[in-house]
Image (cartoon, rainbow, N blue to C red):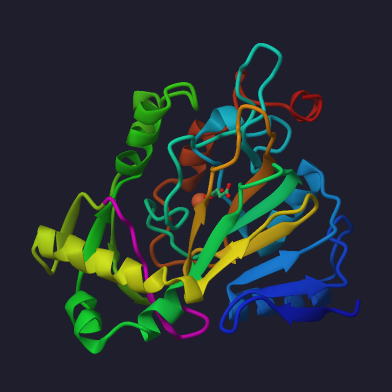
Amino acid sequence: MNIETKPLMPNFGMEVVGVDLSRPLSTDQFDQIRRLYDQHSLLLFREQDLSPEDQARISHYFGQPKIETRKQFNFREYPEVSTVGNIEDDDGKPLAFFARGGFGWHTDGSAACHVDAATLLYAVEVPHEGGDTLFLSTADAWDASPPELQDALRDVSALASFHAHNDPLLVKDPESFIPLTPLEREALPPVWHRVVQTHPVTGRTVYYLNFNPLELSGVDFETGKALLKQALEIASHPDRVYRHRWTPGELIIWDNHAMLHSGTPTYMYESDRRLMLRSFVYTMPTERPLPNYEEVSKIFWPGDNSISVSEVFAH
Ligand SMILES: O=C(O)CCC(=O)C(=O)O
Ligand SMILES: [Fe+2]
């Protein structure tokens, strides 16, 4: 396989050309792709034709997939793959998770302790306008920050909570997903993260940001929130943001330890369809593994009310 690359941004993001991901990859092929992922934080593959089964297989090359927490949108046949978008069945039941309230800049998985994780997002159907996804490098953001801000945040930690992020989404749009049960809520306890971290592969300093911290340590709460806001302003300067306008058949894989991303649900969701397949993979061993990973996976395993491949692709 002759892999070619084309840079997407000066400091991060590569398009990978010459790979058909619907076919099994050899160890050598995957090693090349993995190196590119580690170095460039975001890989784009165009003109693919992937099924949920293919996406599950590709996810497993990268590591241990996580079973997502809105289990209504996990495929019964491929629990490691879920849907994002706005499609519905004939009765108006959502078949994909759609954050009508917006996404905002975030790091997937930042409410869990294991931070080395990739998200895989594959476009099946895209709206005529909008529905782009934005990406930025948190290593570039660190390098672009003034020394005073770097010093003020260096020893700050944030207590991240899945519920602080998730509950308001449900308030904004009660129809968009099924509320978590008490057992599911308990499986997602808050966790502390240092705001400034060293990326384990590149060795670069990165921000690891979570914008709804329950508590901050190493700084007074309001001061800390203002510092985080300042870091985000630098990070999201238009010159540092890559906006991806999706075409069906594109897969993007990004490193959540080195990137922030944001969906832009600005399209006419009443009339225009969007369907993305999504998976999330722990890419490295960690000193802070998820507590009881097996148990947590069972709790979020798809159930009777979860989607199936035939149901999703028939609508
Ligand atoms: O749908 C998008 O553009 C991004 C969604 C997102 O944040 C995610 O899948 O993690
Ligand atoms: Fe996300």
* Residue nearer the viewer, 204 or 85: 85
Is residue 202 magenta-colored? yes
Location of residue 194 with respect to 301 vertically, above or below = below
* Residue nearer the viewer, 8 or 293: 8
Pinpoint residue 267: horizontal percent, then vertical percent.
59, 40
Which residue ends up furthest to the top in the rendered image?
91
Give the residues in magenta. 198-212
Pinpoint residue 52: horizontal percent, then vertical percent.
76, 42
> At 13% from the left edge and 69% from the top edge, which residue is drawn?
218
> At 85% from the left edge and 70% from the top edge, which residue is drawn?
26
Location of residue 254 with respect to 211 vertically, above or below = below
**Quarter of the rendering occupied by the N terminus:** bottom right
> At 49% from the left edge and 27% from the top edge, which residue is drawn?
177
* Residue nearer the viewer, 6 or 182: 6
Residue 271 lies in quadrant: top right
Residue 98 lies in quadrant: top right
Which residue ends up furthest to the bottom in the rendered image?
147
